[in-house]
Image (tube, rainbow, N blue to C red):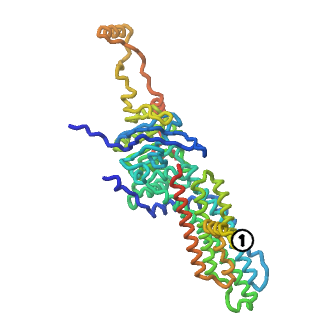
Amino acid sequence: MTNAVPSAAIEIRDLTKDFSLNLRGIKLRAVENLTLTVPEGQVFGLLGPNGSGKSTTIKIILGLLDPTAGECKVFGVPSRRVDSRLNVGYLPEAPYFYRYLSGMELVKFYARICGVTGKRLDARVAEVIDWVGLSGAAKRRVGTYSKGMLQRIGLAQALVHDPRLIILDEPTAGVDPVGAAEISELILKLKTQGKTVLITSHLLAQIEDICDRVAILDRGRLILEGNVTELVGQRDRQALIVDPLPLEQLEELKEWLATRGHTLNAVEQPRARLDQLFLSKVSRSPKGGKE
Amino acid sequence: MSPMANTVPFSLNRLVIVAGNTFLEAVRQKLFNFLLLLAIALVASAQFFREFNFGSSELKFISDFGFGAMVFFGSTLTIAATAQLFFSEIENRTALTILAKPIWRTEFIFGKFLGVFAVVGVFCALMTLLLAGLLYHRESGLMTMHPEAFEHGRIIHYADLVVMGMLQWLKFGVLAAITLLIASFSNTNLYTVVMSFFMLVICHLQYLARDAYAQVASVPLRLLVQVLGYVFPNFQVFNLADQIGVGSGLDASVALHVVVYALIYIGVIGGLAVYSFSSREI
């Protein structure tokens, strides 16, 4: 039996991007010698502080910027080419859409740009709006949407042509925890559909929950990349969660471990995560958004 | 499947979709409605400026005044709308979302142009219709009051009036292409608007420089002025007002030459805008 190597949705090789700051030729290096592969069918997190080169990398993947050096391919097609974007959906950071269009008109506009036509157009637009939970607000003007709703309609326009790769740039920026959790759920649903998702976010807990792999950039350079479980898991440690033990039984357990050459390093009370507590207490908005 | 098989051909359909959205954005803006109302009010007010001279002077005045208003407000609308509709895409970052789709920048730029061209077309159509209505109304009144001055029938050539409206529309098309070219490399809306107004003035007055330097003995200078005369379109060629309305009638071949002249400039300047925008970092 052979282990099938997943094909790459994105292949970046030795990518460098410089921006000219002025006419004297002073340049800012936004990305330096970046080599990265995003396997197909995975949720991939691109992390880094502000100015680390995440958005520049995404713009190069989308063909919005030309690399100074190196190459970038999307499903094997160089990202400079228009056809590299046939199977790509993109939600920009803090999306701002045409305020004078309704949610449905907006998604329909992008669908038609992507070549979705005929009977399939209306059905697909309705389907994707329902999928992001905005059916009830589809006929409202986008200018009246909350930030969370904007993100969701942005996700709808990114998905309307059923792309294989979805790029989400800070999809939860400015969104409340309930909205952020809903977006996380949508991303996980995309993964179950076999989509590849490239996501950037400053919410590291969210990234940890949903990503299979992450890459960390700093000042344009790749400083770490790998499987999330492998990166954050401590292989030389184990946690046993038990009912509360009386002090004498705890001492017995320590002695039992000591006789077998082990040490009890810490005894602490497990804590619920604050975001999970928040979500369990706060009601979620009904499907269709807040009317 | 080979990656090469996934080519995306140029699509007129996508271009029209961008144009439709641009048109919708423009007509929902207050600026367009304000300029339109102001222009209509100005043209309508022309009938209050009367100089009785058996009809012809008054009708000529209304015609000139109407086309003057159309040129002034049409130029303002063309420059403001083109710059605004282009920079709203850049500043609001909607350009990011649309250009991240499988769309050529050529389709985007010409879609923007076509949207503005349609808006200006509506403006010109309304103004021409209003002006023709005003002239017809006043001419009918004068025919009753001074039948001797109209013994050969109506003196206004209404079909020529429509042709003149269309020629103005084409001139605004050239102006929109110039504005789009400046916007394609400019960083701000204000710079684009100011430069476009400068270009408007240059294009209106360039014939003066050509006439003046035609007599110059220095061959290089004369050639330079000739070249500049081709670089900057001559907007005076669109001004056929003397031949229409109360005049002797429009020469169809002249009008056709002007149409071809405008289309060539729109094509070339639009192409330059696409070339400039293709290397712009969004």
| Residue at the image position 75 percent from the left and 84 percent from the top | B55
Left or right: residue A55 compared with residue B119? left
| Residue at the image position 79 percent from the left and 80 percent from the top | B51
Q: Compare residues B34 and B95 and report the one nearer the observer.
A: B95
Q: Residues within 10 Å of mark 1 (few under 14, many from 20)?
A: few
Q: Compare residues A154 and A277 and report the one nearer the observer.
A: A154
| Residue at the image position 60 percent from the left and 79 percent from the top | B254
Which element is circle 1 on? helix
| Percent x, y of residue A6 | 31, 41
* Mark 1 residue type: Ala
| Percent x, y of residue A178 | 48, 37
| Residue at the image position 58 percent from the left and 81 percent from the top | B253
Q: Which residue is mark 1?
A: B212
Tell me if residue B77 comes above or below residue A197 in the rendering.
below
Q: Compare residues B28 and B74 and report the one nearer the observer.
A: B74
Specify whether residue A201 is in view: yes
| Percent x, y of residue B73 | 68, 66
Tell me if residue B132 comes above or below residue B34 in the rendering.
below
Q: Quadrant of residue B197?
A: bottom right
Please state the chain letter of the residue tagged with numbered disc 1 in the rendered image.
B
Q: Quadrant of residue B114?
A: bottom right
Look at the image and tell me in which quarter the N terminus of chain A lies. Answer: top left
Specify whether residue A133 is in view: no
Q: Quadrant of residue A125?
A: bottom left
Left or right: residue A96 compared with residue A4? right
Tell me if residue B278 comes above or below residue B235 in the rendering.
above
| Percent x, y of residue B178 | 60, 62
